[in-house]
Image: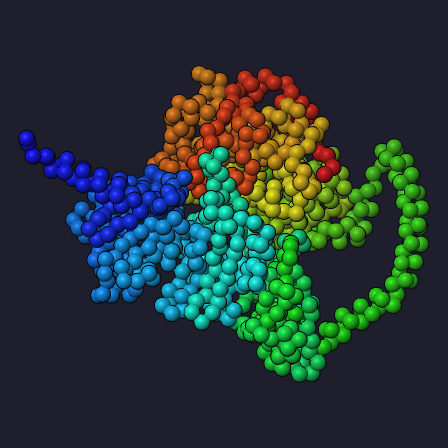
Amino acid sequence: MKAPSALFIYSLLSFLRTSTTLDTITPSQFIRDGETLVSADGSFELGFFSPGSSKSRYVGIWFGVSNDTVVWVANRETPLENLDGLFKVTNKGILVLLDSTNTTIWSSNTSRTAGNNINNPTARLLDSGNLVVKDGNTESPLWQSFDYPSDTLLPEMKIGWDLVSGLDRNLTSWKGTEDPAQSEISEGLDRGGLPQLVDKEGDNIKVRPGSWNGLYFTGMPWLRLNPLFKYEFVMNEKEIYYDYKIPNKSIFVRYVLNPSGIGQGFKWMDHTKSWEPVTTSQSDECANYAHCGAYASCNINKSPVCACLKGFIPKSPIDWNLADWSGGCVRGTPLGCNDGDGFLNYKGVKLPDTSSSWFDRNMSLKECEELCLKNCSCRAYSNLDIRNGGSGCLLWFADLVDLVVLQMDGQDLYIRVAASVLDHIGKNRHFGQKYQVIIIVCSAILLMVMLVLGLVFYVRRMKLRKEGLDIRCQNDYNNEDWKEDMELPIFDLITISNATNNFASSNKLGEGGFGSVYKGTLLGGQEIAVKRLSKNSRQGFNEFKNEVILIAKLQHRNLVKLLGCCIQENEKLLIYEYLHNKSLDSFIFDQTKSRLLDWRMRHNIINGIARGLLYLHEDSRLRIIHRDLKASNILLDNNMTPKISDFGLAKMFGGDQTEADTSRIVGTYGYMPPEYAGYGQVSVKTDVFSFGVLLLEIVCGKKNKEFYNSSQCLNLLGHAWRLWIEDRPTELIDEFLILGDSCILSEVLRCIHVGLLCVQQRPKDRPNMSSMVLMLSSENKLPNPREPGYYTEKALVGKDHSSRKLENPSSSTNEITFTMLEAR
């Protein structure tokens, strides 16, 4: 009988090795590319992988139910370039990754695994996803992957400090969806003062969830409301860390810090075979660290969002009035130190930065106050722990920075002010109590008078309207009440006229159905954009007022900033920040300028627009449907950051309302979904459809409405759909992107996939914006898209109801917004 071949023997040994060492390897065993370790219950696997379309090979750990969801990577910075890698544990208990030349690419060699008295070391993948190296002599691990997290936090994995060994465990995001190398974005515990959770970019704090108050991090009160997770914070002489546990071990969850710096929690949905987001870090502008500077509070429900604390004034009034709040506030009245200072109580806040704080677990709140008063450097105090009515003492000895008024829960903070400030507030309170009865009586009389006058005014107004007169604008402009409602600077007409050179044609930036936009320069040198509503516009004062109030209360980095307004002498003007790069359509639809937009910039623009829409739909106080999202309504600042503009057609929903019917159709051909253009059904999915069209235009570089495939009568949506079902989606991509160095093909194809999901015929098939942001920033598997709406030119033109009740249809060739206004 012939001797068995070497290949057969190697295959047999390999089979025996992988089948008898399911979750563990010893120094005599190893893992080659194509082989895996599997935890005892099958929850996790370890092996070699390549992220996305990358050819580089890494050793990582992933979920058994989702093998494309990697939770830990060994050789993040040193990938293998071929399939010849070998992963093993040495006799000294050190994990190593070797290449084909037996060169060490990566190792776990640390002071904890460098001992000489190691006996029978093993490496085992636990059911928790933790890869543990143990010595046969002891139960304590020599090394474990949980001590060196990547971008994912799993249940029972610690983030924080081991004070004995000096080990600092923190999350660091991947550089990109196909590059697991460490980026500059990290999340961990800052040990200065009272330890607090911070998200950093390099050495700079970007977001500060805050310190632990016994139940949650002070900036994240919603943590305790999620029954899936049980959070824990430990601080003793040996370690400082936080982690979370899952009471139901059958549920798979993970927390990920993605490359854009957003932290999200996910739960595996077995019936859909996909990850569902369950928590997302706060993304409004108040989440930005020190957004309002020192001694100021940030309240996303106010406009402007920043306000000086009582007893404080803006450090730079000019900058403050121009919405530059970074300089913060200073005391209006100096402290008297031991001469009668006191404290003002701020309720429901995220506590300020604790990096310069002092704390004591055993002191009462009264003792805390007394201690703060005795120290002239003490700025504020609070309870350390809010459980059981509060306990412990927390003192601040530096400027109070990053104080946020929360939408739910929050803590009490006692801020030190001079005695005169307290006296002033006390006198006002005493006045209110003393004259409360008189005010109520006078108010009742005044109300009766106002009702009578209102009736007279109404009758008079109806008479004037019948006679063709309209004096509302001037009367309303002189009414101070509406100015207070605006919470926004009111410009006079002479100032704006001088700034725009009397609305000279040379200053005109553009024109639409609403009127014209002009560039202007104020006396101080600030450049502005002035939206001048046409005098023939059907938009009345009330609608204009609603629009201004709406925009003024929207605060997000991806929404254009409204600086003020003007109503005078029949003029209705909106004053915006001026953005030098103008609108997106001037880039992507221009043969020359489109070359300036590489894929990295286009991808950032897509993500920025998505985040802006997410804020409008879900994160602002009211649900806002834009209804006119298109390339010309996306403005670009100096850094090419996209900002959604033109809210003249926006519809405001209250509470949990998500859809409505309207008899007045407004919008732009090519961006309107069929259910809205045909039947007036408006919902958040209206904007999702428009976003999908815009996304495909950004990738393709061509307009949906002007694109035409003569052989098949297809518009851009139909062309994209045809290429998709024929497995030729790369033909849709702008040729300048294909030639560019920054093009990541997997990202571009994912964007095309997402765009087609957005423009599906049925609204219920389209994802919402929270799912959209997740789809764009993750590598989770996407559902297959269905047929889009209006994917042929014949369908678009032939359906009469698609243009029903649209004004001035002849102007559609210039992509002017069709406007039929309705009160919101």
In the figure, is residue 150 to the left or right of 527? Answer: left
Q: Is residue 395 above or below residue 408?
A: below
Q: Residue at x 67, y 22 (%)?
A: 804
Q: Is residue 169 visible?
A: yes
How many numbered marks does the figure carry?
0
Q: Residue furthest bottom?
A: 338
Say which of 16 and 371 sits in front: 16
In the figure, is residue 415 to the left or right of 63? Answer: right
Residue 699: x %, y % from top left: 44, 34
Residue 469: x %, y % from top left: 85, 36
Q: Residue at x 92, y 58 (%)?
A: 441
Q: Is residue 512 above or below residue 503?
A: above
In the figure, is residue 637 to the left or right of 724? Answer: right
Where does the C terminus fall, quadrant-wise?
A: top right
Residue 421: x %, y % from top left: 72, 73
Q: Is residue 711 above or below residue 684?
A: above
Where does the N terminus fall, quadrant-wise?
A: top left
Residue 729: x %, y % from top left: 40, 28
Q: Residue furthest left?
A: 1
Say which of 726 and 370 sits in front: 370
Q: Is residue 496 visible?
A: no
Say which of 327 and 309 sits in front: 309
Picture quadrant where residue 761 is located: top right
